[in-house]
Amino acid sequence: IFKLVRHIFSSVSILKKHKINYLLGTGGFMSVPMVIAAYFLKIRSGICEQNAYMGFGNRVLSFFVNDIYLSFNKTLKVPFKYKAVVTG
């Protein structure tokens, strides 16, 4: 937990430094601190799920993002279907 908090604070400084308008997370443990930092800074964000089964990291991040981009129409375990867009 301590490392996650430390990485979120590092991500906040990176996002402020580069003045990000939109953040796209591609899943996995590397996306978690950056997407959560964007949420706290009120930066629009989205996640991209390339698999037919949504991974744990993206399921957690779905609470913090504005958009969810899916590769498959029948991707399983999408918590917020109204945020989802099938991109093909």
Image: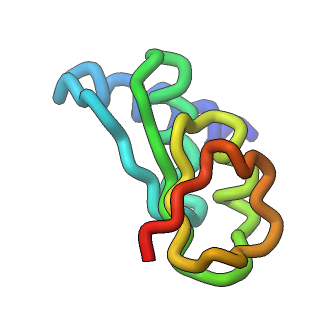
Residue at position x 45%, y 53% in the image: 25
x%, y% of residue 88? Answer: 44, 77
Q: In this view, does 27 lie above or below 84?
A: below
Which quadrant holds residue 49?
A: bottom right
Which quadrant holds residue 83?
A: top right
Front one among 5 and 63: 63
Q: How is the image coloured?
A: rainbow
- The tally of labels here is 0
Residue at position x 56%, y 52% in the image: 68
Residue 14 seen by the camera: no
Say whether residue 26 is left or right of residue 51.
left
Say whether residue 71 is left or right of residue 58.
left
Front one among 21 and 4: 21
Q: Is residue 82 above or below residue 44?
A: below
Q: In this view, does 38 lie above or below 84?
A: above
Task: Tell which residue pokes out farthest to the bottom in this image.
Answer: 52
Front one among 63 and 74: 74
x%, y% of residue 63? Answer: 71, 38
x%, y% of residue 75? Answer: 70, 75
Task: Tell which residue pokes out farthest to the left in this image.
Answer: 18
Say whether residue 85 is left or right of residue 17.
right
Residue 31 seen by the camera: yes
Locate the N terminus by quadrant.
Answer: top right
Residue at position x 71%, y 77% in the image: 74
Q: In this view, does 54 lie above or below 47?
A: below
x%, y% of residue 39? Answer: 53, 25
Residue at position x 40%, y 24% in the image: 43
